[in-house]
């Protein structure tokens, strides 16, 4: 039985995306690990900024996803002219939104920290400001980089994005080593290194996609055209995806605020467990990116049989790859956690939290976060918004506050509530796909 993608085409897309996912996660992990030499307060400060930063970055990712869905469906249909127009208009949206966000947030960053996290220790607050400024300045470059990499994935050129991610990591880690260890700049040095790596990533991707020979060439982007009909199609996916992601990250920030109330040790433990969570989902995140391209192109061709086939196939691949990567990580957890420089009491509490996280990522995460990418690729974004909003606020936020404030539990409760959220999402998304209602959704 023949499918829309050959095995070679499928894995030439997926494998670089998994590597790219690892390299993307490594930038954040490198900041946390290398800053840990400055103490728990520095780790906590970087963690709090990353929580807010992820909320804003989600908006860029949402528009990039919207653009990738639209462009992938045009490519699946064979309409290269509209695919190229969609590529350029995605960049216009990404530039406008990211510059506006930076201009708004930069002068009120301290107020935002206070609003979300309330009273935090003075040294933690000082570190948040040092790290936040260069991260904010990097947003326009990151937004355009995200859009350009989404376009490369839609064109099945994932090796390109992997190579650029590797370059960004070299710049980031090298910059961290110099600015933190040699110059002694601490979190500010980590932020500057991230800024430089994002500028480089954007510049290289823009150069690569400027080639006229590429299907999605952005040559002549200054001249346009601005196509309002295509912008509306991108926003039809991007706005609900942005709202869904924003709701998710606002909920995370509320939970992070609850975590901050438990003290600096709890914040540091949460940051380490968050890195475990990110690391364990590396293969899944890479495959999820491939889902957008693969399912999007199948939907553009109205190939419903392959949509079902690839959804099942790639979901199974997420489970297998996650289990493979998490098993040794589970065994080596104490040694890995010790790298973060936690105090002895914090280290003892962190080990079981991180190990339980690895188990939950292997069992419940794929249904909660792989299946919605299939629904995004076919345009069923409103259901994702409903399901994510309901689950997030009932289980993750409501559950966390109930367990901590009502039952007096500690940092462990934050993670128990998150797992309840994952289970609820998995049930809702599985039921939606089984119903077949997504088949009625159209994007182009």
Image (cartoon, helix red, strand yellow):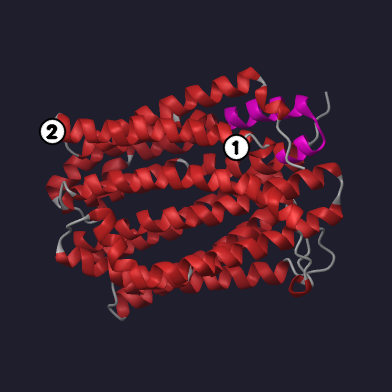
| Quadrant of the frame with the C terminus | top right
Residue 171 visible, this orientation: yes
Q: Which residue is mark 1?
A: 381
Callout 2 crowding tier (Cα within 10 Å): few <14, some 14–19, many ≥20:
few
User: Looking at the picture, does residue 378 appear above or below residue 221?
Assistant: above
Q: Is residue 176 magenta?
A: no
Q: Position of residue 367 (x, y in %)?
A: 51, 28
User: Looking at the picture, does residue 67 appear above or below residue 302?
Assistant: below
Left of 288 or right of it: where is 420? left
Compare marks 2 and 1 and give the one earlier in the sequence.
1
Between 294 and 354, which is closer to the camera in this rendering? 294
Q: Position of residue 392 (x, y in %)?
A: 39, 35
Q: Which residues are magenta?
A: 296-317
Callout 1 crowding tier (Cα within 10 Å): few <14, some 14–19, many ≥20:
many
Q: Residue at x 56, y 50 (%)?
A: 62
Q: Position of residue 441 (x, y in %)?
A: 70, 32
Q: Position of residue 391 (x, y in %)?
A: 41, 30
Left of 268 or right of it: where is 378? right
Between 379 and 371, which is closer to the camera in this rendering? 379
Q: Residue at x 53, y 30 (%)?
A: 320
Q: CA distance from mark 2 to mark 1?
A: 37 Å
Q: Nearer the viewer, mark 2 or mark 1?
A: 1
Left of 368 or right of it: where is 231? right
Which element type, helix, strand or loop, lies under badge 1? helix
Q: Which residue is mark 2?
A: 408
Find residue 163 and report its image quarter: bottom right
Q: Residue at x 86, y 49 (%)?
A: 79
User: Looking at the picture, does residue 95 appear above or below residue 29?
Assistant: below
| Quadrant of the frame with the N terminus | top right
Find residue 64 and report its image quarter: bottom right
Find residue 293 and report its image quarter: top right
């Amino acid at each position: 039985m023949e499918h829309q993608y050959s095995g070679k085409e499928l894995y030439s897309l997926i494998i670089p995306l998994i590597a790219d996912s690892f390299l993307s996660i490594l930038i954040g992990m490198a900041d946390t690990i290398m800053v840990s030499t400055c103490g728990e307060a520095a780790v906590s400060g970087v963690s709090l900024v990353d929580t807010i930063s992820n909320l804003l970055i989600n908006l860029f990712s949402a528009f990039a996803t919207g653009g990738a869905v639209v462009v992938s469906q045009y490519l699946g249909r064979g309409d290269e002219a509209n695919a190229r127009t969609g590529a350029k208009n995605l960049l216009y949206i990404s530039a406008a939104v990211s510059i506006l966000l930076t201009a708004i947030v930069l002068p009120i960053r301290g107020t935002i920290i206070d609003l979300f996290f309330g009273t935090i220790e003075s040294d933690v607050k000082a570190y948040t400001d040092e790290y936040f400024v260069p991260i904010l300045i990097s947003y326009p470059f990151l937004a355009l980089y995200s859009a350009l990499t989404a376009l490369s994935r839609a064109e099945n050129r994932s090796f390109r994005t992997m190579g650029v991610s590797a370059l960004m990591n070299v710049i980031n880690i090298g910059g961290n080593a110099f600015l933190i260890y040699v110059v002694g700049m601490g979190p500010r040095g980590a932020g500057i290194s991230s800024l430089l790596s994002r500028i480089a990533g954007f510049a290289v991707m823009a150069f690569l996609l400027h080639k006229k020979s590429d299907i999605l060439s952005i040559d002549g982007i200054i001249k346009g055209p601005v196509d309002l009909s295509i912008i509306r199609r991108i926003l039809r996916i991007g706005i609900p995806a942005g709202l869904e992601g924003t709701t998710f990250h606002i909920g995370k920030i509320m939970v992070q605020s609850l975590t901050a109330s438990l003290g600096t040790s709890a914040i540091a433990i949460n940051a380490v467990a968050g890195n475990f969570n990110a690391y364990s989902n590396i293969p899944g995140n890479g495959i999820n990116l491939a889902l957008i391209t693969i399912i999007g192109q199948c939907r553009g061709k109205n190939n419903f049989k392959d949509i079902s086939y690839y959804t099942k196939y790639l979901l199974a691949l997420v489970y297998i790859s996650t289990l493979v990567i998490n098993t040794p990580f589970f065994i080596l957890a104490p040694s890995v956690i010790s790298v973060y420089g936690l105090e002895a009491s914090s280290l003892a509490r962190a080990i079981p939290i991180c190990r339980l996280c690895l188990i939950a990522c292997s069992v419940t995460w794929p249904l909660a976060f792989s299946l919605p990418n299939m629904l995004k690729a076919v345009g069923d974004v409103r259901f994702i918004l409903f399901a994510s909003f309901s689950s997030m606020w009932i289980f993750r936020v409501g559950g966390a506050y109930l367990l901590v404030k009502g039952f007096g539990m500690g940092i462990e409760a934050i993670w128990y509530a998150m797992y309840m959220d994952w289970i609820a999402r998995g049930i809702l998304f599985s039921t939606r796909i089984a119903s077949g209602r997504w088949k009625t959704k159209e994007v182009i």
